[in-house]
Image (tube, coloured by chain):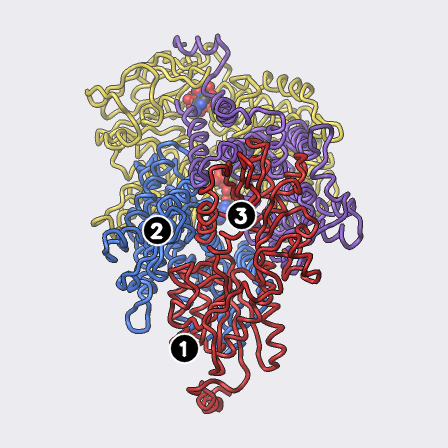
Chain colours: A blue, B purple, C red, D yellow
Amino acid sequence: MTATASARAASGVNVPALIRHYAVLIMLVALFAVLSVSTSSFLTLTNLLNILNQNAPLAIIAVAGTLVVICGGFDLSTGAIFSVANVVAAWVALHFNSPLLGLLAAPLAGAALGLVNGAAITRLRIHSFLATLASSLVYGGLAVLITGGFLISVPAGGFTALGRGGIGPVYYAIVILAIFALLSGFLLNRTTFGRYVLSVGGNAEAAELSGIRVNRIKLYTFLYSGLAAGIAAAIGVSRIGTGQPQAGDGMQLLAIAAVILGGTSIYGGVGAIWRSVCGVYLLALIDNGFDILNANPFFKDLTTGVVILAAVALSVASKRR
Amino acid sequence: MTATASARAASGVNVPALIRHYAVLIMLVALFAVLSVSTSSFLTLTNLLNILNQNAPLAIIAVAGTLVVICGGFDLSTGAIFSVANVVAAWVALHFNSPLLGLLAAPLAGAALGLVNGAAITRLRIHSFLATLASSLVYGGLAVLITGGFLISVPAGGFTALGRGGIGPVYYAIVILAIFALLSGFLLNRTTFGRYVLSVGGNAEAAELSGIRVNRIKLYTFLYSGLAAGIAAAIGVSRIGTGQPQAGDGMQLLAIAAVILGGTSIYGGVGAIWRSVCGVYLLALIDNGFDILNANPFFKDLTTGVVILAAVALSVASKRR
Amino acid sequence: GCNSDVSQVYSSSTPQNGKTGPVRVALLASSSQNGFNKAVYDGAVARAKEYGDVEVTVFDGKFDSQTQFNQVQNVAGQGTFDGIVLVPNDNVGIAAAIPAAARAKIPVVTTLFPVGPQLTELKPQVQGVVSTVAADTEANSKKLAEGVVGYCEGKNPCRVAILIGQLQFPFDNLRNKAYRSVLDGHANIKVVATGQGNYDRDTSMKAMQNILQANPKLDVLLSNADQQTIGAQVALESAGVDPSKMYITGGGGNQEAIKQVRAGKWAADQVDFPNSMGKAALEQVVNAVRGKQVTPVVDANTLGPVPVIVTKEILGQHPDFAGEWAD
Amino acid sequence: MSVRFGSTQALDSVSLSLVEGEVHGLVGENGAGKSTLGKVIGGLYQPDSGELEVFGRQVHRWDTRRAQEAGVVVIAQELCLVPALTVAENVFLGRESRTLGVLRGDLRGRYRDLEKICGFGLPPDAPVHTLSIADQQKVEIMRALARDARIIVMDEPTSSLTADESDRLHEIMRRLRSRGTTVVYVTHFLDDVLGNCDRVTVMRDGRVIRTAPAARETKASLVEAMLGEPVDMVLPERPPAPSPGTAPVAEMREVRSASVREVSLLVRPGEIVGLAGLVGSGRTEIARALFGCDRVESGQVLFGGAVVTAASPRASIARGMAMIPEDRRAQGLVLLRPVLENVTLPHLRRFSRAGVLSRRAERAAVRELVERLGVRPAALDGDVSVYSGGNQQKVLFAKWLLGRPGFLILDEPTRGVDVGAKSRIYQLIVEIAAAGTGVLLISSELEEVVGLSHRVHLVRDGSIIAEVPGPGTSVDEVLQRLFEVGATSPGTEGRP
Ligand SMILES: Nc1ncnc2c1ncn2[C@@H]1O[C@H](COP(=O)(O)OP(=O)(O)OP(=O)(O)O)[C@@H](O)[C@H]1O
Ligand SMILES: Nc1ncnc2c1ncn2[C@@H]1O[C@H](COP(=O)(O)OP(=O)(O)OP(=O)(O)O)[C@@H](O)[C@H]1O
Ligand SMILES: [Mg+2]
Ligand SMILES: [Mg+2]
């Protein structure tokens, strides 16, 4: 054992590694602190619950997206899947006059589209970046076709229970996000499936050689991502009470940005779920801060860009020797 | 040697490899043929020149983007650079009352922003996917700040000469694209710089150990990409005569889609310029076809998605043994 | 110093019959980076200045209904604002957020579009919306199309190209349907092409070039947005078509459009008055906050100095009107 | 069975039978098709023609999964591990004990049991990307053993192990054999083949030349069968040593870097200096510090008598240095690019004017070199990725020889290289030195280092513990000295 190695092991704390892993959390806490002292309207239960609630659908997508990215893939179709699932939910709820059926249809539709993605990627052996870019166009078209370009309003009262109701002051969306994130974290770290996801993303050939059905694992991650987009869509459509064919536009990029902001490598093989959730809420705090502080929205995009760069630079700077 | 092997060697033609390399061209030709027979207004000089002209700015961005992707990077900021460069051009033309100066300002601004991208990526060691995602937010904010959220109309007549004029029936934009593509092809295949780009994308560590300034090569590719976006912006703004802060929205994804559609590997190390140009025009033909055939625009996205999938599946299917 | 303020907050909490102190209004723009919204904002700010004790803050809706939904929720939750002026991104979804504002006793005035399931119903449809400052989109669209019918009289065939924003948007879908309901009743009028201009000059220019390719002889360009018509005009002119020989419309009444109509290049434009709308909306929301009389429907068509459809002749009678916004 | 890649016939009507419970040696020149055959057995490649029988049953479809299920495991020649997973996780990848898909916490226990058999002493919780190649190779071996396989194909498993570790692996092979496991042992170390195999199959140009009991073969007979001609197996004569007064071409003075401690050494023009040490002793790190890859914390590097200030590989190359790194795939070659481009990469300035390449000049120079080194296939435009391991190594040699360096670092230059090529490489090293180039030679094959070098530095724990002359020193002596200082048992030598 070398001297430095033992020293490091002895002290037990590796500051650069800590910063690298916690960069996004550090930024989040910093921003939280800044907002807390700069305005009294930030640190209120309502506001915090609102922030959590508003971004829960995006966070759910980012959670599943983390698995996809760890597995070496990219899902650019989650926004479009969100759109399809949310109009499907509204359509089903309206036509079968059953809010419950409608809300259940969204995750199912999402999972089905995710399955199609996965099948296309593994069967046709297309890189997921392009495959999901293409499928997002197809799905987007599908969402428009389902609605005929109109909105689908669901008047039934029960339909909005999921999106607007909650357990006490805590919205259902937050509860669902918490459960989904914990479950996904468990899946990644405590199950063979998670281990296989890590290994396929780390070195697909090695995984193949170890008898892992690489294609099947990949397919499952896309299925999972589609399912997540479907769940997110159920929450989203229930909140608004209306199916819109553009509802998911742009979500996919935000979700991926959050995942990478959380330090998950775009080359696959490493990553953590909770950090992606932090990534989502870091972006959310910037938005909320601008609204609350009454800042000039012209600067919002600019600030968001700078914060992302800062977070990543922080995590990368600590990696240097 | 087996019979098939010798037969193949004798004929000297390797069909799968051909399909793989020419998949995008095959799709392009097929679509071209379909449109030619289905409407008489497609196969006319004006229409073809129009298609070439309309998409020249995107193609210019895709050409440079090919170098970035081959070098193992991603430039998601070209759309935002286009926006900044086009408002800068309008602003300069208006304030210095010089159309020429304005049009020259666009490529300069583009190159400068590309340089900033390159510097951020190589200095801060951030992956380009995230760095350019962040910088595109910053640049987008910048474009809005420059205009104050308005458009900048340039009344000077000379300002539109570049975008609307041409040599005989051939628009300047087409000429510029042709020159830029040929130059870039030459750069990639016939110069030391191109060789370095290929090797850095193929194996950055081996390149570094071979004495190549990996970071500098990467930086140059982003500079080049920014320059291309600036040139494209000069054409775009001159065509419309107005600087718009959202002008480039979404271009970056289209450009990357075209590059990958052209078979350039997103892992870097291999690719070809002309195929990216084919990718741009494959997408363009779909658009043109819908407008000319007066087809229901609801189906446009769907069709585009399916064509992309088909093209890639075609090229990938031929890769199997 | 949080504790010492508590009593003040209580004492100044909205009295039954209206607030007396300064009024803070949140203007939820559909996008803050857009000329039309800027004009609404400028109008609101100008009116606020006249009041003296009214303050307006703009929020960027990013053309995204979820974002705007969240903003309504945030404003309702924070208690920093007394009233909301809304330029909605979608009319139905946002309605779901309004009750939160209503619960927080924050009145909402919507502009440009009504809020609620009916795009054509201007009377407030949702509890919390106190006033709608908008015009009847369907009626206005029909008026624009009727101009086309007039022009086409005696022409057979009369070839019409429609350039619509995006058919996926409900209001554009509504406009398109309104156009068709007028045009399709006339046998001589042929809608030969429907292109999407996406409120963008470059997109419209491309679409127009392509449409011209299939239909070199066009009599009418019916566009719902000025930005689109400007882009299409580039395509027409570079194809050697003289716009003044056709019947060309725009929509929005921005400064460029008014110029073109005055110059006789465009035949007609459907005018919006965002600045006046901003003023009117602010008035209504301030009235609501102060407990004064509120007008539930302000017909936006009546706000400007000119009628909703302008032609060269009409503008000739209003030499000072330049359009209320630029984009 | 036949396998074809494009126009390359990798396997041509090969027939091979494996007996249960034997160690079956597979030898042949670089590119003979050994790895391909191994991959066919492991189900990675499907044969174009021919049949496969496993345990007496004819199989129609054969892929990695079916192979796994039938108990066939391949240790690939090119390392294939999941970098971010730990040693233990890699070892048991795909074999995790689970309850309803949830992992059980017995990974360490299982690892400890396996470690008792192997005794490699690897840290079970270290991510494998932090290990050296040699250690990664051990992980590969452990992974195969963890599978309770009935057939294990080991493709050059010892190429980066020390003699001692190789012996341990051979011991494991014997144990496997006694349990009825069949081992296919691909290697270029003919002594190992003769000493440890029951039967040997010799391959050449994709064909099986013969299969015979190992007892009936000799080194010479194997070589002749492999190459088709007898080859002189002795090391070439060293070039004359430069006089001790000659100014050194490269020098390190008390250099310290992340894992190098106070190293001083010098190499004179025309001199071959060896670095001998156990695996993980820091030889590669010394070379990297010298070449400018790693940051030097203190001390000086001198090149041509001048102190190097802003050190980088680029600066070193500009000064006429060259280095063939130990990991040819990760550090040496751009696998997706053709041979031609790989070879000329560091020298493009010579083949260009104002940045524009002259491809004709490039081709001419590379063709000459490729022929001289016997790279096969000799085509210049094929991607290096499909070249056999040994031929990739030759391409790397060509790459650096093209620059006629004044000083050359060779880190494991003969790893995975066949006997014929090896003697050609030895010949080359001697020629290079004779032409006045200083050479720093690192190799885990002590015969090589001791037999070729004028002076040999013994390396332990990142520092040089002694210097011995090459001529007149025996390999045993060096081994003794390498171990005696350590005093720890050789069995646990290696990583902390
Ligand atoms: N995937 C592939 N595509 C094309 N050619 C290949 C491929 N794999 C191997 N080859 C070719 O097949 C031949 C046999 O290669 P193989 O790797 O089996 O040799 P080997 O005997 O293992 O050599 P070495 O001792 O150098 O490892 C070589 O000519 C090689 O270039
Ligand atoms: N990337 C790394 N991260 C952590 N430790 C490393 C890394 N690379 C090498 N080491 C450690 O540095 C020490 C020296 O390794 P090095 O590879 O130089 O040894 P070597 O003598 O060249 O042996 P080998 O034959 O394996 O190349 C070893 O203890 C090794 O574990
Ligand atoms: Mg081999
Ligand atoms: Mg080494």
- Secondary structure under tag 1 reads loop
Give the quadrant of residue D362: top right
**Label 1 is found on which chain of the structure?**
C
Residue at 62% across, 32% down: B50
Q: Which residue is mark 2?
A: A87
* Position of B159 relative to C302 (above/below): above
Q: Chain of mark 2?
A: A
The answer to whether A106 is drawn above or below residue A173 in the figure is: above
Horizontal and vertical percent position of residue D377: 51, 17
- Residue holding disc 1: C104
User: Is there one chain holding both mark 3 and mark 1?
Assistant: yes
Kindly identify which chain the residue marked by label 3 belongs to: C
Callout 1: CB less than 8 Å from ligand 2: no
Mark 2: give few (<14), some (14-19) or many (20+) Cα within 10 Å.
Answer: many
Name the residue tied to disc 3: C198
Residue D239 visible in rendering = yes
How far apart are labels 3 and 2 at the CA level?
22 Å
- Which numbered disc, 3 or 1, marks the residue closer to the eye? 3
The residue nearer to you, when weighing B2 against C277, is: C277
Q: Residue furthest front?
A: C154
Name which quarter of the figure residue A176 lies in: bottom left
Secondary structure of the residue carrying numbered label 3: loop
Kind of residue at disc 3: Asn
Q: Amino acid at mark 1?
A: Ala
**Observer-nearest of C247 and B285:** C247
Q: Amino acid under label 2?
A: Val
- The answer to whether mark 2 is within 8 Å of ligand 1 is no
* In front of the other: B29 or C283: C283
